[in-house]
Amino acid sequence: MMQTEKRWDSLSKPPKSLGKLEELIIQLAGIQENPLPEIGKKLVLCYAGDHGVVKEGVSPSKQIVTAEMVKNFANGGAAISVLAKQNGAALTVINTGMANPIDHPKVLQMSIAPGTGNMAEGPAMTRDQAKRAVELGFQLTKRHIKEGVSLIATGEMGVGNTTSASAIYACMTGLKPEEITGTGAGLLPEKVPHKAQIIQRALKINHPDPKDPLSVLVAVGGFELAAMLGTMIAGAVYRCPIVVDGFISGAAAVLAMTFHREIRNYLIFSHSSGEKGFQEVCRKFSIDPLVDLKMQLGEGTGSVLIIPLIENSLACYHQMATFEEAGVTEVVQ
Amino acid sequence: MMQTEKRWDSLSKPPKSLGKLEELIIQLAGIQENPLPEIGKKLVLCYAGDHGVVKEGVSPSKQIVTAEMVKNFANGGAAISVLAKQNGAALTVINTGMANPIDHPKVLQMSIAPGTGNMAEGPAMTRDQAKRAVELGFQLTKRHIKEGVSLIATGEMGVGNTTSASAIYACMTGLKPEEITGTGAGLLPEKVPHKAQIIQRALKINHPDPKDPLSVLVAVGGFELAAMLGTMIAGAVYRCPIVVDGFISGAAAVLAMTFHREIRNYLIFSHSSGEKGFQEVCRKFSIDPLVDLKMQLGEGTGSVLIIPLIENSLACYHQMATFEEAGVTEVVQ
């Protein structure tokens, strides 16, 4: 990382003037243990799962929409399908626990259960299910890294999963549910207080321990979030950068960084979120996403959009002339 | 633009959830008068010019660096050279008034004079020179648009041009020089008050009229900034989006929007700037740049970096399935 920083300073531009682009390559050098890092194969892992809590009216969409959108992902019609293709990333869609599984050659079937339990009535999942979901993401990610993938963008689909993410944030940050609960994918503002009350109830009856990420998944998690946690752990173990998307993917990241604080060095936070309370979460966990394009879509769209930024940074790092090569006078003060 | 917004809402995602990506395409539809806009040939116009005010010690770089960097641009070793190539944009470097012109087949020679006058002693240029520099940018841009360029990113090189830009902002916003004067490309912080005093003196002795952009160029401008103003005017006249870079390019944009307020509809503000006072300028002129990657380089690097965002937006807009095509249930509330 120090060698990489030194090379940046030798290139024909004011020192540090490429800002976060320079930091990205320094991070990548650390991840790859290589002062001249490269990115080859890119992959989006898009985890789908359903949430029992939708019975409580926390989402404007019916649960069938998870299945409909997963089909749309696989058929190439969704935003994430288009953006993955546009940025040269392969897209893998994984059923981690859909209530209405769809049979499609492009959807990996790794379902833990047909949706989580209703967190407002009891735990979302058993401890064994949580472990299996994390393991699923870990093994899948490990396999892809071993096969040569060098950048993994995370994405998800699951009607009701902003409720799960908000509950995770509330537990992990100590924010009150009403401080970290928003409209998600189109909930009417007048229904947000009800959503926050459901989260309040779920945290009360399932009493997760913020120091034990697995207990948080058991209490209020989703299978797709657990699998994503597995991906982030594998990224750190097998030295591959994992791109964090927005609000949902960020909840998995908060669990991952609590599980082991070194994992944050392998995460690239891509897009901010306008969802209520997210700025406060960022402050508490020192998260500083690269961009904020006022997107609120999920699916992994934010993670994939920053791939060109990484590739542009790499291009500058590898192709720019040094002061010496260019014959440009360096400022010495 | 209304048709474009309607199409966005028909695509299989929560309405408006692609945020600024949706707004970009709506803007583009308006510029091209086409509900299905496209971007074809992309061009970076990189204007170089020198500034007499460097005699006052406002920059840590010697004036020869303008020439050295222009050569670096043309030889492909600078950040803008690499980024233009990486994003499929042609790069044209134009000598609008270098003190040390370099003879290079890739540098267009359109010099108005070998650098501006020292604004601390008198006007930076004559009114005739200002007009000719604006005209130069206008005609060059017109020609490129007529030849099929559909996106123009602006960039610049000129030792001392943050002094000119700060002076323009001070004049156009009423901010005091010390409120809008920063370190530029590496000036030591303790020398910034002197730079602000020079700007103060220049504004006092040359008394530009903020309602008359040409008078501002005459007083404290640069030839590269004048040419860039010409580019922005031509973009509006010939309906081509012009991407504004950061601090320097933003000063030309402020002049352009004052020259005619409709010009702003043809401008895409790419990158914010950490230069002192820029946030206040953005507030006063309702400028909301797409990204802030903490870059402070200029050259057009910010403008070129957002090309992938535009292309990703276009890909979504043209390739995503509608709710109907995808068979996804729309939320109706």
Image: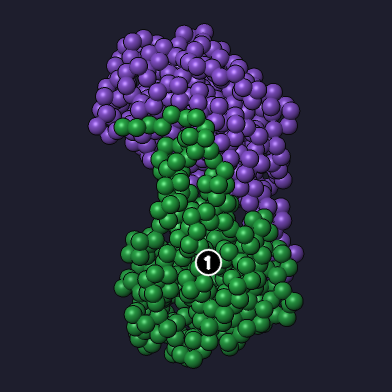
Chain colours: A green, B purple
Count residues near mark 1 (Cα–Cα under 10 Å), then give few for <14, some for 14-19, many for 20+: many
**Residue at image coords 45%, 54%:** A26
Q: Which residue is mark 1?
A: A240
Check disc 1 and give the amino acid type.
Answer: Cys
Please state the horizontal and vertical placement of residue B117, each as a whole percent of the image: 41, 12
**Residue at image coords 63%, 43%:** B87
- The answer, for residue B184, to whether it is visible in the render is no
Residue A310, relative to residue B303: is it above or below? Answer: below
Q: Nearer the viewer, residue B126 or A197?
A: B126
**Residue at image coords 66%, 76%:** A67
Q: Quadrant of residue B296?
A: top left
**Quadrant location of the N terminus of chain B?**
top right
On what subunit does the disc labeled 1 rest?
A
**Quadrant location of the C terminus of chain B?**
bottom right
Q: Quadrant of residue B59?
A: top left
Q: Nearer the viewer, residue A280 or A267?
A: A267
**Residue at image coords 53%, 83%:** A135
Query: In the image, A293: left or right of B166?
Result: right
